[in-house]
Image (cartoon, rainbow, N blue to C red):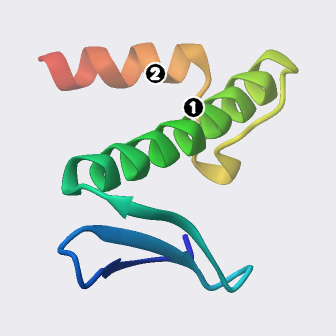
Amino acid sequence: MAWQVIKQPNGRFLIFSSIVDMILFRDCSRAQIEALYIEDSRQKQQYAITRLMDTIERGENPYFQFALSYEEAIKADKKASK
């Protein structure tokens, strides 16, 4: 994220983007800044989990050499549960 939170002279905050060199949000409270960051993170995680699930549903391996099969996961779980 290329956002910078900057305190304004009036005590409120703005978010400046170094990608577009523009102020994206201005005159925000602390709670509004927190909410903007939380929503941005939520959207990024939603995108990531959608990609992960789509990859798995296509039968592809999203974990490269560290992937376990169903059987390997069950076997590892049983071993760890002993």
User: CB under 8 Å between callouts 2 and 1?
Assistant: yes
At 62% from the left and 85% from the top, the residue drawn is: 18
The residue labelled by disc 2 is 73
Q: Earlier in the sequence, mark 2 or mark 1?
A: 1
Give the camera-side residue of 40 and 7. Answer: 7
Q: Residue type at mark 2: give it.
A: Ala
Q: Is residue 65 left or right of residue 42?
A: right
At 42% from the left and 13% from the top, the residue drawn is: 74
Q: Residues within 10 Å of mark 1 (few under 14, many from 20)?
A: few
* Residue 54 horizontal/vertical position (percent): 79, 23
Kindly give the residue lying farthest to the right in the view shown: 58
Q: Is residue 54 left or right of residue 18?
A: right
Quarter of the image containing the N terminus? Answer: bottom right
Q: Residues within 10 Å of mark 2 (few under 14, many from 20)?
A: few
At 57% from the left and 31% from the top, the residue drawn is: 68
Q: Report helix, strand or loop for mark 2.
A: helix
Q: Residue type at mark 1: give it.
A: Leu
